[in-house]
Image (spheres, rainbow, N blue to C red):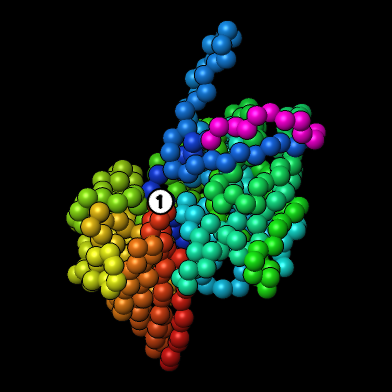
Amino acid sequence: MRFCRTPRRPRLCRRTRRLAPFALLLFTACTRSSATASPPLAASVSSVAVGSASAPAGSPSGSAPSVALAPPVNLLWGGPSAVSVSSTVANTSDRPSQLVDGVTATAWNGATGDLVGASITFAVPADAAITELVITAGFDGTSSAGKDLFTSNYRLRKLRIDPLPGTKVPPGTPREWTLDPAVRTPQRLPFAIPAQAPAAAPAAMTGFTLVVLEADPGSERGWKELAVSEFAVLGQLGARRWSVPQPPEVAVARAPREVRLPTDEPSPPFDAFVGTLTPRPESACAVFEAAVAPAFAKTDPNYIFPKPWCKAGAPQKATGTPAASVSLVELELPLASAQVLRLDLPTGSALLRGSDACTYYHGGGCSDDMRTVTTRITGATITASALTVHVAVKNVSHDGPPLTTATDLTLYCPLNTTPLGCRRSEVTKEAR
């Protein structure tokens, strides 16, 4: 996202990454299956539910009291972290960032043919403790045509984990897991890595690479892409943590030696403040402004816009059933801004994750002294299971020779997931 505007503060242009969720992803584990014999350095896997707190386990009966730990959180969101994937599919709909966006209706898709040997690399600070990993075996979503993307795509069956150079692994720690490719909900991989001695430098990290050993084909035999909806690393944060939980950058094909943890807290994207349905349309803005206030408090006062930080345009009725309307909402963020979609249902209203129309990455961009951007909803249809919205973005550049970029953006937003989020596709044309 870029913005350069208002004469009352210095001109500022910046880009931010893809957007993603309001709070730390917390997980509640389902009951473990009974213990069974397993190969050395391998472990059984159980499923896990997304979106709820996980209480610390108590001491076994008759044992000495244990020190109570804070519930595990998603380390990838809570503080400095780095994530990369081995490849990405050649389309505009399925982005690497969707691996960690908290929305199971979206997914990272690898390049065609990148199946066995495909990988996910992650790193967290060395003073953070890892308790377990959570991953979906496939793409837990449906297409706009109603196709089940989980059974249609390749799904994970077996994974190996390799430490990055300098990362210590306790003896007996599982190094391989067999997943159930028939389970579409996130699965828990037991993987306890204690915190190292307090990090002497911000760059000190613990890192691993997950490598795909086996993958099962889906019903669409012509589809040769691996698809994974969600990945999380649970544990206790170290000394460094973000004031506002937010997703990491997701790089593509980054070599382990190039993995680096961010040293500065990034400006939170709008998805960091998006919650679930609120009772009334106006309360969606009220919740956003209350959530963004602590981040504004840490910002230079010269760079803060006065309220309102959330301004909604006129709602437009969506055709179909149930009764619903959609509107474009302008948001102010610390050092940034966004224009996103709000959905109004009889049961409440929500700002939708992944619905940003005004960003650098999606062919739009907030207006500034170098360009003028106009955004409008051209159509919206809703069914009991999904919302589809078409948005037209016109970007006229005033920086150099005249250039007009027109983007037709389609947002497909399943309604049976929490949080509510959208998959996107777009067609962009340029004219001079």
Q: Residue 64's x, y, as percent?
A: 57, 9
Start-end of magenta stretch: 30-40
349 to 372, vertically: above or below: above
The residue drawn where x is 43% and y is 90% is 431
Along the viewing direction, whichever of 18 and 16 lies nearer the viewer:
18
283 to 430, vertically: above or below: above
Q: Which residue is mark 1?
A: 418
Q: Quadrant of the C terminus?
A: bottom left
Left or right of 243 in this view: 34: right
Mark 1 neighbour class, 10 Å CA radius: few under 14, some 14 to 19, many 20 or more: some
Confirm whether residue 116 shows in the render. yes
The residue drawn where x is 31% and y is 79% is 378
The residue drawn where x is 76% and y is 30% is 37
Along the viewing direction, whichever of 15 and 416 lies nearer the viewer:
416
State which quadrant residue 24 falls in: top left
Residue type for callout 1: Thr
Left or right of 331 in this view: 180: right
